[in-house]
């Protein structure tokens, strides 16, 4: 059973954050949008051509690409970060789409305001990718505009200030099981069910 649940280009997400913090406001926004567009283009090429693509080999020639919401700066949010001590209670067994379990450690809780309301997401870290925070989440768009089970974000592990973190929903992506049922993907836990629609990032895949 295939068990890939982190996007192949997590490094590209790190680069986007570096780009964003390296320029003045106007330059930064231009470079940021270009960076996301380039990352999406590279992802589609990977899906279309690479042997590790989640798209079935017989379907890759017919692959027409992925759908996204327009890039929207209002979905890039600075959240207050509360770290969770490394204790046994921080470990969670995330259920997967195939009934298996995946051990994850709760790294922290990101609290943010959006559309005038307060929201929170738990950030996870795994032994497989200790430098990347894994953020699975659900929202009311699931099953209609976005993948039914939920979506993910990858965030570089903070190295400086650790009381704030950037949540960029423009980078939200589908788990591999959105394209291929042979994958086993973690299901977002109840604590990460947002009540507000997140119309940013990747939309439902229409090729299945």
Image: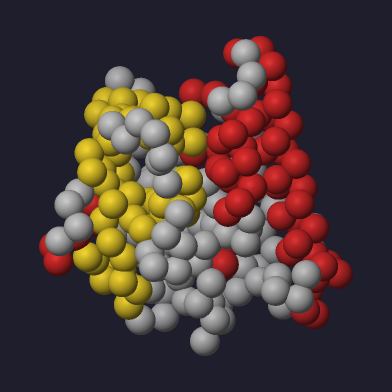
Q: Which residue is found at the position 70% from the left and 22% from the top?
A: 30
Residue 108 position in % (x across, y down): 26, 46
Q: Which residue is found at the position 40% from the left and 41% from the top?
A: 158
Would you say 129 lies left or right of 138 here? Answer: right
Residue 102 position in % (x across, y down): 35, 74
Numbered disc total: 0
Residue 170 position in % (x across, y down): 55, 37
- The image quadrant that residue 80 belongs to is top left
Q: Is residue 78 above or below residue 68?
A: above
Q: Which of 49 and 10 is in front in this view?
A: 10
Where, quadrant-wise, is the C terminus in this rendering? bottom right
Residue 94 appears in the figure? yes
- The image quadrant that residue 38 belongs to is top right
Q: In this view, does 124 lie above or below 79?
A: below
Q: Which of 157 and 99 is in front in this view?
A: 157
Q: Which of 22 and 100 is in front in this view?
A: 22
- The image quadrant that residue 204 belongs to is bottom right
Would you say 89 lies left or right of 46 here? Answer: left
Q: Nearer the viewer, residue 144 or 62?
A: 62
Residue lying farthest to the bottom in this orientation = 1
Q: In this view, does 149 lie above or below 61?
A: above
Q: Which residue is found at the position 23% from the left and 43% from the top?
A: 83
């Amino acid at each position: 059973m295939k068990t890939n649940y982190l996007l192949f280009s997590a490094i590209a997400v790190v680069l986007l954050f570096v780009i964003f913090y390296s320029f003045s406001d106007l330059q930064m926004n231009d470079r940021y949008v270009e960076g996301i567009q380039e990352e999406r283009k590279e992802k589609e090429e990977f899906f279309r051509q690479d042997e590790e693509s989640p798209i079935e080999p017989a379907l890759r020639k017919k692959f027409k690409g992925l759908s996204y919401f327009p890039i929207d700066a209002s979905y890039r949010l600075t959240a207050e970060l509360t770290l969770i001590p490394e204790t046994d209670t921080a470990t969670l067994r995330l259920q997967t789409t195939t009934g298996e379990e995946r051990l994850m450690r709760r790294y922290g809780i990101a609290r943010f305001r959006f559309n005038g309301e307060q929201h929170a997401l738990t950030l996870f870290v795994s032994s497989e990718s200790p430098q990347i925070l894994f953020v699975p989440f659900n929202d009311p768009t699931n099953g209609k505009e976005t993948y039914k089970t939920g979506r993910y974000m990858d965030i570089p592990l903070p190295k400086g200030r650790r009381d704030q973190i950037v949540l960029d929903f423009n980078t939200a992506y589908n788990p591999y099981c959105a394209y291929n049922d042979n994958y086993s993907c973690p299901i977002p836990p109840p604590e990460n069910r947002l009540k507000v629609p997140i119309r940013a990032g990747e939309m439902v895949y229409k090729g299945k």
